[in-house]
Image (cartoon, grey):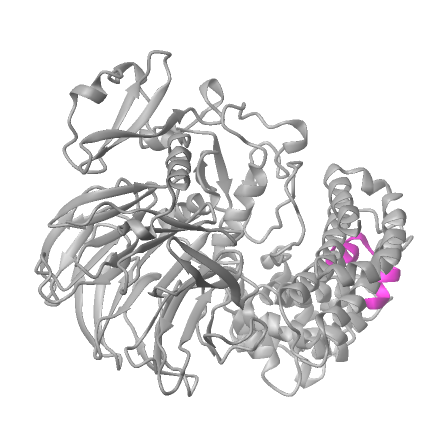
Amino acid sequence: MAGDFKLSATLRGHEEDVRAIVFPTRELLFSASRDNTVRKWSLTAPKPPAYDDTIALQGSHWFNGLAYAPPSSHHPDGIIAAGGRETFVFVKHVGSPPDADPHRMLIGHAGNITCLAFTEDGRRVISGGWDSQVFVWDVEEGNVVAELTGHGGPVWGVIVYDAKLVLTACADKIIRIFDVNGKSLKSIKGHTDVVRCFCKLPSGHWSGAAFASAGNDEVIRLWTLDGAQVGVLHGHEAYIYSLAILPNGDIVSSSEDRTVRVWRNSKCIQTITHPAISLWTVAACPETGDIVSGASDNVIRVFSRDPERQADAETIRSFEESNRMYAIPAETASQGQPFQKENLPGPEALQTQVGQRDGQQLFIREHDGSVTAHLWSSTTSQWNLIGSVVSGEGSGANKRQYDGKEYDYVFDIDIEDGKPPLKLPYNATESPWDAARRFLERNELPMSYYEQVANWISDNTQGARLGQSSQPAPHQQDPWGTDRRYRPGDAAQSSTTGERRLPQRSYISISEGNAQNAVTKISESAKQLQAAGKLDPVSLLSDDDLAALQTLVDQLNKSSSDPHPTESQIAALLTACSKWPRKERVPAIALLARLAVSPSFVSATSSGEKTIVETLAQTGLLEQRQETANNAVHALRLIVNLFASDSGRLIADGAFESALQLTRPFASEPESPAQYKALAALYLNYAVLVVAGAPADESASREARAKVLLIDIATLLECESPHANDGDALYRILCALGTLLTLGEDFRREMKSGVSGTLHVAGSKPAAQAQNVKEVMQEIRDELR
């Protein structure tokens, strides 16, 4: 019988969570991360293994899904597919240069892509995502050849079972079996919570099953293709994120309980504890039987049963020590209930109690009153120390009660105007991403809020540490007031934490104004202008137009992040914006700005001969010194809000030069504080876009675009307008400037002199005394050194 898995190699290089891994050969593995990269790891030494890494794919948002197809006549070196927040499936040849364009970029998903799988011949790739859609793509043609429909929630997992069958795992708790051409064959119910992952089991497997599945109900279920459940594997104590199968038939699983577990004959035969909260992914090498994990501590770890491929004794000892030193939150250890350490056994239990299964937990009250956690190893028949249990950052009287449990924070989340806020409980010991995900799943909210909520939690709990008081320091006070309320779409403000703000990676939107008031004003103006004979027939709004706009109020109240405007609603607003007297245009352009976050708005306004940015120019909405400055305010906000969707960013990208040319006059002389704030948001979004990827016009380098944008940013920072003295706006403009400086050392060196002078001017403004402004200015100065 083979021995236990032991650490073989530790691979460091990713800067954020490792979300997906494939391990196709002993010489090669690929990993996808929240740091916006897919990395290729190549074996450089076999015993013990050592790997060199290169960036195989660079995106502008995080990656979740990853798949590999081996070499074939079509792809001699093999291909990879990756997808995530950008909603594109990127297909790239293995071995192509890191900066080479993808072989294919498959566009069709409306939400984050979570999972990918190639067919056996590598000619098709299947993708699933938060939009509840599953597409079958022809890789060479670049189009959808089939759609697997019927999912009632986000799709978290997909596997190609054989040349005919595809299985999907869904948040609606159902496993579905399709043929590869899209025909639905069977729906399997049995999971009691979200289904996340699969692995195919080999013929003649000890379980008698064809495949295994797992998810949020914390168990692994074994199924036949007829939908009969033939086994359930218990042992994990939190969500199970990933499954893999070893060449000998052992099942491997990874979980949010810090463990990778190995299963044989319905029992857990080994538990591999990690010094990380979430084990997002696990994969097995079909050639060696080694396994690899990817975790929330940004680290990839390879484990082997072969002594020749195991790390040296000191490296293994260091890994085991990092597990023993790991601080386990009391809230995690006791599933959120008050931790009753007075009822725990003493150290003698480690000698007298025998574990019932591998991976069973035992908590011990040490003689000094501390609590330690131990896991039973069935291989060695002993309890292994895995960490110390500690109280959360807001222990004692500062804890807050919610739903019968104690938390460090209980946030209010405003999802819909006019409705009571939802509660988001959070402990400083957990991952903001996990807390955000659980909140959205519990309240059945769109996953489009995922990144915003997670980032907001992180920003508003920065500086919190185990053992500290939960009362924030003055410089950490909640920017929304004492109720710590979050509103999707609002940009979170940074607090003093010592953590880096640059480069900024997230786009911001501006969602302001009362939709009902705007529609009421439009209706009143329509009647007054018609009665006064100031409108020609093509400028009139019909009763149907006004009724459609009234419906728009409900759409915005229901979802400000994507109100799904209709073409008739957009057309009515465009009529008012372009043909009415300028003073009467304000409510219509204000509504259009609110709608610009929606992909359907982009489609309706930019599918003809001109884009919405060109429309704004032709209608004069971005001219200075109009009868009202608010037309320009809302026109600026409209361009800002285009960055909220992938399709909108394509329009903003293509309009880079024209948009800046149109808005440049306001940089030297903002006509109102609102214009100043809107320009700040616009420049920040364009800075993120420039740094994130190449421009639409390949002849223009990112550096060339950055120089143009930097001049406009400097103009705005140095302007002497009385309207240019808002602290939040100044902070955003500086973040835009600092983000551009992260393009590279040569660019920083070239820009250093001019930027230093601009910083000196900006630092003399009264708004520059704000703490977050001071800190980002210091970070920029550090970049310039």
For residue 446, say whether it is visible: no
Against 619, residue 734 (above or below) is above
Q: Residue 3 at x, y = what percent?
A: 21, 46
Against 741, residue 498 (above or below) is above
Residue 666 in magenta stretch: yes
- In terms of depth relative to the viewer, which is nearer, 719 or 592? 719
- x 70%, y 76%: residue: 655
Q: Is residue 119 left or right of residue 545?
A: left
Where is residue 595, by image quadrant?
A: bottom right
- In terms of depth relative to the viewer, which is nearer, 688 or 120? 120
Q: Residue 139 at x, y = what percent?
A: 40, 82
Against 44, residue 601 (above or below) is below
Q: Is residue 603 left or right of residue 375?
A: right
- x 66%, y 62%: residue: 521
First to last magenta residue range: 664-678
- In terms of depth relative to the viewer, which is nearer, 330 or 316? 316
Q: Residue 151 at x, y = what percent?
A: 29, 66
